[in-house]
Image (cartoon, rainbow, N blue to C red):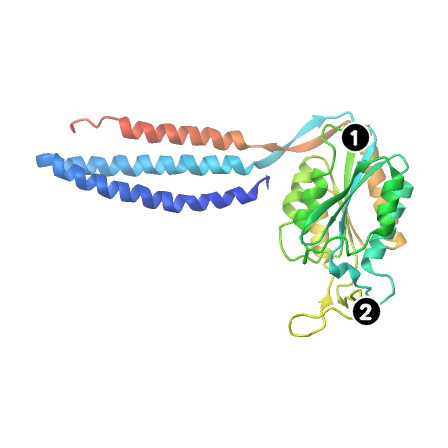
Amino acid sequence: MSIEHPRVLWLLLALIPLAALQFYQFRNGRHDLGLLAGDRRESVLTVYLVKWFFSSFFFTLAIAFSILALAGFSWGQRSVEEDRSGLDVVFAVDVSRSMRASDGDETGRIIEARDMMQGIVQDLPTARFGIVVFAGQALRTVPVTEDRVAVDSFISSLGTEVLSAAGTDLEQGLDAAFAAFPEGANRNRVLVLLSDGEQHRGNPLRPAEVAGSAGVPVFAVAFGSVDGSTITLSDGSRLTDAEGNVVLSRADPGIMEDIARASGGSAFRGGGGEAFGGLMREIRGFEERREREGFRLVSVPRFRVFLIFAVIALALSVFVRVFRWKGVV
């Protein structure tokens, strides 16, 4: 099961003040009705209570189901025929300060990521490439293009100074990278995530699941050591926290594996030859399978189910209100 717009679920909190408002209206209506009912006050108020309870319950249920429909729940899979040829690759590159860490050697994480990107571009001569960089925010720096000069030029100059936003938000990076693919292009699509996995906000599994349901696997490459290393700033000093303690940046390959798994892709460790070779085999294998099979499995959106329940609940709410209770005027 996946949810396309999980933030919409926060609207469910609006049911609390809605319930309070309905109860307030019930108390006022009960008071006014009691003054008018006369001798039949007890039976009239009993009917009013029953009608109010079920009508309010079904109305609240209708609102809840409508919110669930907007959230975009999907479950189950169905096959979709495709006739795709060619390959588009979008790099989502972490340029936060933690990518400056060198992990015990002179090569920083960002340099390893840069070398891997250049290797991928060289080994896929017919592919088109796009680049998204992210830290605390994400930015599309190179749209998907066949212009390898522009791609190579940007990669060669890529560093952690591209963005000034502090922190790391993998969710924003993946969202921007998935949105970078041209709409309507009849090509196979691959998203390559290059990061140490260190994150400070966001839920990266959501965009990974969205990409996977659209047939776009995320191949995640984790750079850095889990033991941690210091971050060297541009002036040669080491990054410290507010209390003056030296900051240790620890890679998190676990979240990178979770992202890859959620999208149907694969995860790799480090920027060495073994990781590069494994990544290239996966990308080529994915392209060959897609062109050979001619179809892919996609999640089935289920918003209609919730809309049907919402309409039924709303109809029941109206019916309870207008239904005439025998023996009570």
Q: Position of residue 30 (x, y in %)?
A: 20, 40
Which of 11 and 281 lies nearest the eye of the viewer?
11
Crowding at dot 1, Cα within 10 Å, few <14 / some 14-19 / many 20+, comes out as many
Residue occupying image coordinates x 69% and y 43%: 176
Q: Which tag is nearer the camera, tag 1 or tag 2? A: 2
Crowding at dot 2, Cα within 10 Å, few <14 / some 14-19 / many 20+, comes out as few
* Residue position marked by numbered label 2 in the rendering: 236
As drawn, the label of residue 170 is: none
Residue occupying image coordinates x 69% and y 74%: 245
Q: Earlier in the sequence, mark 1 or mark 2?
A: 1
**Could you say whether the residue bearing mark 2 is in a helix, strand or loop?**
loop
Residue occupying image coordinates x 54% and y 44%: 7
Residue occupying image coordinates x 42% and y 36%: 63
Image label count: 2
The three-letter amino acid code for the residue at tag 1 is Arg
* Residue position marked by numbered label 1 in the rendering: 187
Q: Position of residue 321 (x, y in %)?
A: 28, 30
Q: Quadrant of the C terminus?
A: top left
Q: Position of residue 240 (x, y in %)?
A: 71, 70
Q: Residue furthest bottom?
A: 244
* Quadrant of the image occupied by residue 211: top right
Is residue 278 in sight in this rendering? no
**Could you say whether the residue bearing mark 1 is in a helix, strand or loop?**
loop
The three-letter amino acid code for the residue at tag 2 is Gly
